[in-house]
Amino acid sequence: MPLLATEAESSYFQLFVKAKRLHWDPATIDLTRDRDDWAMIRRDHAAEQFEEQILRLCSLFYQGEESVTKTLAPLLSAVPRAGLGLDKELHLAAQLYEEAKHFDFFQRYFTDVLEQDGAASQAWMQPAPQAVLVDDLDAVTDRLRREDDPEALRAGFVEAVTHYMGVVEAMLARTGYVGVSDALSARGWLPGLQEGFRLIRRDEGRHVAFGIRCIAEMTAARPDYRPLVQATFERQLPNVLGTIAAFDYPTPLVDIMKLQQFAIGAYTQFMAAAGLTDDADALAALRAELDEV
Ligand SMILES: [Fe+2]
Ligand SMILES: [Fe+2]
C-alpha cells in the first residue's frame, strides 16, 4: 500500500523524519571517565549505598529496554492488519531500531563500566517492575499478535499503546531518565551515562508523543475505547508506584517526590489525550495512592 498524501504530512510521519535526522550510535559514547567515577563511587560512597542504587537503576533500564525491544513487533504488525496507516508503521519501524539501540547502550555499559554481565540485572527485578515492564507488557502485546478480528485488533492496539507508551515509556522510562539525569548531573558523575540518558530521553519523547497522538485520535473516533485506557492505567498503577518506591533509600540518589510528580504528569497527559481529564475521581485516587507510598 502506498503512503497517502495525508499520511506523508501527518504528525506520525514527521516523528519518523525526525528519528532519521537525530540518529546516534551507542558505540561512540566515551565511557572512559565513567570507569574512574564508578571506582570512586564504590570506594568513597559505600555508606550511602550509591553503588547499589546505580546498579538497581541501570538494571531496570536494561531489563526495560530489552523488554520493549522484544514486544514492539506485535504493535508494528498490528498497524497494517487493523488498517491504521503506513505513517504509523514507519514511525514504529524507527522506534524498534531505537529501542534496540537503547538496549545496546545498557549492554555495553554493564560490560564496559559496571564490569558485569547484563543478565545479572535480573537479580534486581522485584515483582512490581517485573510485572509492569516485562510480564504484563509481554501478555498485552502477545494477545495483539494472536488477534485476527480487525475490530478486536484495534481495541487491543489501544490497550497495548496505553501500556507500552503510556505506562512503561511515559510513566516509568522517561520519568526515570529525567530523575537519574538530574541526580548525576548535580554531582557531575558518570558523564557517559548522562550522555546516553540524554540521547535516549530524546528518542523516548518521540515514542511518548506517538502514543499520545494514537490515543487522542483513536478515542476521539471511538469514545468506547476510553474505559480501556483508564482500566490499563489503573491496573498498572500499583506496579508503577512499587517500582518507584524501591529507590527510596535512607540517602536516596534520586528525588522520589520528583519521580512521582513526573509519573503523575505523564498519566494526566494521557488522560487528557483520551478525553478523560474531567474524571476528577481518577486523579484524586491516583494522588491518594501516591500519598501512601
Ligand atoms: Fe527505549
Ligand atoms: Fe521508547
Image (cartoon, rainbow, N blue to C red):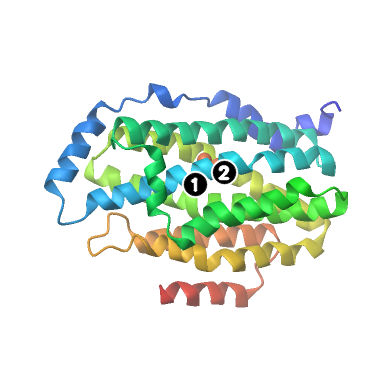
The quarter in which the N terminus is drawn is: top right
Mark 1 element type: helix
Q: Residue furthest top?
A: 28
- Identity of the residue drawn at 46% across and 31% down: 104
- In-front residue for pair 149/206: 149
Q: Are marks 1 and 2 in contact (CB under 8 Å)?
A: yes
Disc 1 from disc 2: Cα separation: 6 Å
* Location of residue 113 in the rendering, given as x and y in whole percent from the top left corner: 29, 33
Task: Look at the numbered disc 1 and say if its residue's Cβ is closer than 8 Å to ligand 1.
Answer: yes
**Within-10-Å neighbours for mark 1: few <14, some 14–19, many 20+:** many
Residue identifier under label 1: 64
**Within-10-Å neighbours for mark 2: few <14, some 14–19, many 20+:** many
User: In the visual, does 262 lie left or right of 91?
Assistant: left
- Identity of the residue drawn at 15% across and 56% down: 47
- Identity of the residue drawn at 22% across and 38% down: 38
Above or below 19: residue 64: below
Q: Which quadrant of the structure image shows residue 231?
A: bottom right
* Location of residue 274 in the rendering, given as x and y in whole percent from the top left corner: 70, 60
The quarter in which the C terminus is drawn is: bottom left
Task: Look at the numbered disc 2 and say if its residue's Cβ is closer than 8 Å to ligand 1.
Answer: yes
Amino acid at pointer 2: Val
Residue identifier under label 2: 68
Above or below 217: residue 100: above
Mark 2 element type: helix
Residue 206 visible, this orientation: no
- In-front residue for pair 78/95: 78
User: In the visual, does 206 lie left or right of 147?
Assistant: left
Q: Which quadrant of the structure image shows residue 48?
A: bottom left
- Identity of the residue drawn at 85% across and 47% down: 148
User: In the visual, does 193 lie left or right of 291?
Assistant: left
* Location of residue 110 in the rendering, given as x and y in whole percent from the top left corner: 35, 36
Q: Which quadrant of the structure image shows residue 7?
A: top right
